[in-house]
Amino acid sequence: MMNTITDKEFTRFQRFIYDAAGITLSPAKKALVCGRLSKRLQAHQLKSYGEYLELLDSGHVADEVQTAVDLLTTNETYFFREPKHFDLLRMLARAAAPRAQPFRVWSAASSSGEECYSIAMVLADCMPTGHWEVVGSDISKRVLQRARRGHYPIERTRHIPADYLKRFCLRGTGEQEGTLLVDRTLRNRVTFAQVNLNEELPGLGQFDVVFLRNVMIYFNGDTKRQVVARVLSTVKPGGHFCIGHSESLNDISTAVQQLAPSIYRKP
Ligand SMILES: C[S@@+](CC[C@H](N)C(=O)[O-])C[C@H]1O[C@@H](n2cnc3c(N)ncnc32)[C@H](O)[C@@H]1O
């Protein structure tokens, strides 16, 4: 029989993921927490979520906090999600192509890498000089492992334009039937790092474009303001900042000018 979470235990999980990642879990997420963590109770042969919380607090099991963070984050993503941002990227990359210094793009909550490889495909296409860099980062180690592999079920890749599929992807055969591997040359051009946006950022340098898409929805107003300020400090003057279509910077930041819904430019 599946264990249930008491209200008190749920409050402790809310605090756990808020402290670890800045994520605010609404009471409606109780069943989700229950479902996602039930296998950890089994793995450690625990009888209740309270015992699991004790285990997390004790710090006795290496990596259990990371495992819980991995399970409590929502990693939904796909290639060329919200295509308007890739049209913008194409335009910016073509305009920057003749310059000598690299055109740098950061996918700041990259999940399993589809966003980074979509960016890399556009840059490889529009900047034949090869003077570009893509950095992907996420708090979840589990999705970063998938991102580095660059190996996806074929049904997740249907938005990749046909010519990019031919140029940058390998279709699996035999045992790999039904999968797609991003070509090694492109994979080698993308760097992944574990970054918690809710903490001081590591030195990633300055970027021409930053994608911070579909992650702010999990943060409360104060956390959004802090994360956006941190991330915007890495955007070059004149650089661009893209957020998810369902997100907004209203009451969050005035440091950038809005060019279109979900697209901003740093003066
Ligand atoms: C829904 S996915 C969005 C992926 C991609 N940007 C997109 O729009 O398709 C949200 C990602 O944000 C990550 N995330 C959540 N809190 C984070 C934090 N504090 N720091 C870094 N990444 C975080 C999650 O692990 C998850 O992979």
Image (spheres, grey):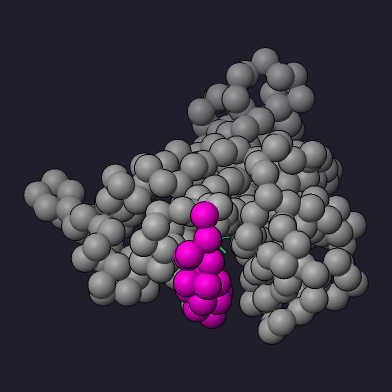
Which residue is nearer to you in this view: 248 or 257?
Answer: 257
Q: Residue furthest top?
A: 60
- The residue at the point 51 percent across, 28 percent down is 43
Residue 150 falls left or right of residue 236: left
Q: Residue furthest left?
A: 174
> Can residue 151 be seen by looking at this rendering?
no
Q: Quadrant of ligand 1?
A: bottom right
Image quadrant where residue 180 sits: bottom left
Magenta-highlighted residues: 84-100
Q: Residue furthest bottom?
A: 260
On screen, residue 91 above or below 75: below
Q: Magenta stretch: residue 43 in it?
A: no
Q: How many marks?
A: 0
Image quadrant where residue 240 sits: bottom right
Where residue 24 appears, as percent x and y from the top left, is 78, 55
Which residue is nearer to you in this view: 134 or 92?
Answer: 92
On screen, residue 90 above or below 11: below
Where residue 187 appears, as percent x and y from the top left, is 36, 47
Which residue is nearer to you in this view: 28 or 262?
Answer: 262
Q: Main secondary structure of the magenta part?
A: helix
Where residue 56 appears, as percent x and y from the top left, is 71, 27
Q: Locate the C terminus by quadrant.
A: bottom right
Residue 48 falls left or right of residue 78: right
